[in-house]
Amino acid sequence: MGKSEFDIYAQLGIRPIINCQGQRTMLGGSRLSQDVVQAMVQANGSWALMREVMERSSDYVAHHMGTEAAYITSGCAAAMTLSAAACISRNDPDKRGQLPDSTGMRNEILMPRKQKYGYERAFTSSGAKLVYVGEENGCSKEQLDQAIGPNTAAIGYLVDSPPDKSLVSLKDAVEVGRARGIPVIADAAAQIYPIDYFLETAQTADLVCFGGKFFGAPNSTGFVCGKKELVDAVAEQGFIAFQTQADGQRAIGRPMKLDRQSIIALISALHTWVTMNHEDRLLGIDGKLSAIQHGLSGIPHVRTQIVSTDHYSGSSLQVVLDTAALGKTPESVARELDAGDPRIWIVSGEGDFFGAEYLHDRRLPPDTFVINAQALDDGEVQVVADTVRSVLTG
């Protein structure tokens, strides 16, 4: 990496980061491929009617996902907010114009209590009220069914892999909802691999939300796909509808605007993702991790292990410290790497700042940090190995 790559950052006083965490919003989401960048450049070269860009591109997404319809959004959280709004207003222009004040509407979204998490805020931004179902240690299909009441607008569900067997499955939640006329909104943000699983998840619930950054689209992109009637209601909440609604009842999605370049970038990245050789992709990640592991070999009081995950990233390198003998903790290592030159971010157990949030609820042991390689380019691998070794032996 030459310094010229970072001139714009240097001019702004920004210290760039070598990203050993992954596709995280706070680190910029994704590193765009040359194909995606070229698609954006081509889109930038001509004006287009945004409704046509959105409709044709969303149809393209629906075709690849095998769903009735899709709608491209400014990220997965926007997809969740617009989906919740659609389930509350259901194409009623008066209700649409009243949101996020949902007074007098069916505005409750049921959610397993065990799935309570930070991103549920995306649901309540629409005016929805969350109603938690079950206990802290689980939620059954029967409990979900019994919780449906006269104010239930939708069921919210966090898709995770592997699935939590103490919770009603997504398929069972959908079965409950459809039997009672209640749509299910699934947050499947990063559930994009294996491809068969990606497509199956997209085709399961009534509205399924994904984040574009995970498959190489810009940070500010995502999509929702599912049943056409509901996706149409989502579109009526979107930023384009806000401009064109003649009834005066404006949609809530105006702040969630996309530019044409980002929309085209998403379909370019999605096409690449669903057609690429993922075995080669995962072997490439393993190769980078193996090189870093080799670079850390032989350090006293340090053990390393490459661990396969159920995540699209494939594998991670776990670095386990004898903290007492080494005189360092994962958190102190992370802070030293953050302060160094080059600046490197790993995953430690110190919360969102160093990426523990990236692991969802799977907290790391207090003696362990993780290096992920899916966001690294080839030229960064040896830099990471040398710098982390220097910190651990310094």
Image (spheres, rainbow, N blue to C red):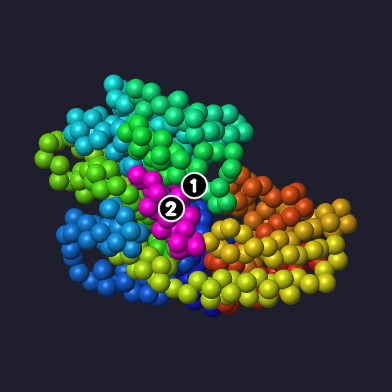
Q: Eyeballing the image, is 328 above or below 105?
A: below
- Magenta region, residue range: 187-210
Pointers 2 and 1 in contact (C-beta within 8 Å): yes
- The quarter holding residue 17 reads bottom right
Q: Nearer the viewer, residue 164 or 236?
A: 164
Numbered-mark total: 2
Q: Residue at x 85, y 62 (%)?
A: 301
Q: Residue at (87%, 53%) from the top-left corner? A: 324
Q: In the rendered view, does 232 fall on the left or right side of 191?
A: left
Q: Amino acid at mark 2?
A: Thr
Label 2 element class: helix
Q: Which mark is residue 201?
A: 2
Q: Is residue 339 left or right of residue 46?
A: right
For the N terminus, give its image quadrant: bottom right
244, 387: nearer the viewer: 244
Which callout, 2 or 1, points at the residue further toward the start of the chain?
1
Q: Position of residue 350 (x, y in %)?
A: 67, 47
The image position of residue 65, as x and y in percent, is: 35, 59
Of badges 2 and 1, nearer the viewer stands 2
Residue annotated with mark 1: 159
SS at mark 1 in the image: loop
**Does residue 274 appear anywhere in the picture?**
yes
